[in-house]
Amino acid sequence: MTASTLSAATGRRKRAITRVRMSLGQGEIKVNGRPVNEYLGRASLLQVVRQPLELTNSTERFNITITAIGGGLSGQAGAIRHGIARALVRMDESLRPLLRKAGFLTRDPREKESKKYGRKRARKRFQFSKR
């Protein structure tokens, strides 16, 4: 970690992986070099990203730089939330019970089931004909 970075963590959800770097600042959040509201667009996704910061009353305390790869916007928003929560715990261990109770430290294990050969999708079958 560099001198300007106080905490770094990795967040994951679905196929999305994010690297979160936190430093003291005035509440700026940038994803892949763009402001978070421009990158994600939807208000519901912005709300997901800000949940751990609002829970710990630290929305204006940190500047957060995020690198997001893989997945879609929803998966990336969940991965960002996971990464921010983990970075907050690395900064202040006393926040762990609060973030754990809210479920922000648990990695969501749900993944897309892979397609099977001879089928259209993972479970869809062709129409059965008796005659």
Image (spheres, rainbow, N blue to C red):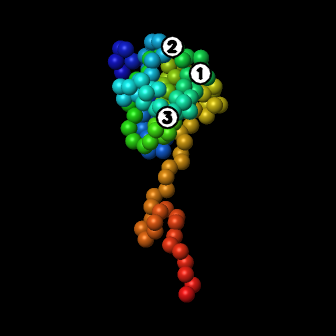
In terms of sequence position, does the residue under pointer 2 or pointer 1 come before the other? 1
- In this rendered view, identify the residue nearer to me: 44 or 95: 44
Tag 1 residue:
54
Residue 45 at x, y percent in the picture: 53, 33
In terms of sequence position, does the residue under pointer 2 or pointer 3 come before the other? 2
**What's the CA distance linking mark 2 and mark 1?**
11 Å
Residue 24 at x, y percent in the picture: 45, 13
Quarter the C terminus occupies: bottom right
Residue 121 at x, y percent in the picture: 47, 63
**What's the CA distance linking mark 2 and mark 3?**
20 Å
Residue 104 at x, y percent in the picture: 57, 32
Q: Mark 2: few, some, or many residues within 10 Å (few <14, many ≥20)?
A: some
Q: Mark 1: few, some, or many residues within 10 Å (few <14, many ≥20)?
A: few
- In this rendered view, identify the residue nearer to me: 39 or 82: 39
Residue drawn at point x = 50 percent, y = 39 percent: 74
Do the numbered discs 1 and 3 sit on residues whose CB atoms are within 8 Å? Answer: no
Instruction: For marks 2 and 3, give the one nearer the viewer.
Output: 3
- Identify residue type, mark 3: Ala
Residue 106 in view of the camera: yes
Quarter the N terminus occupies: top left
- Identify residue type, mark 1: Glu
Tag 3 residue:
77
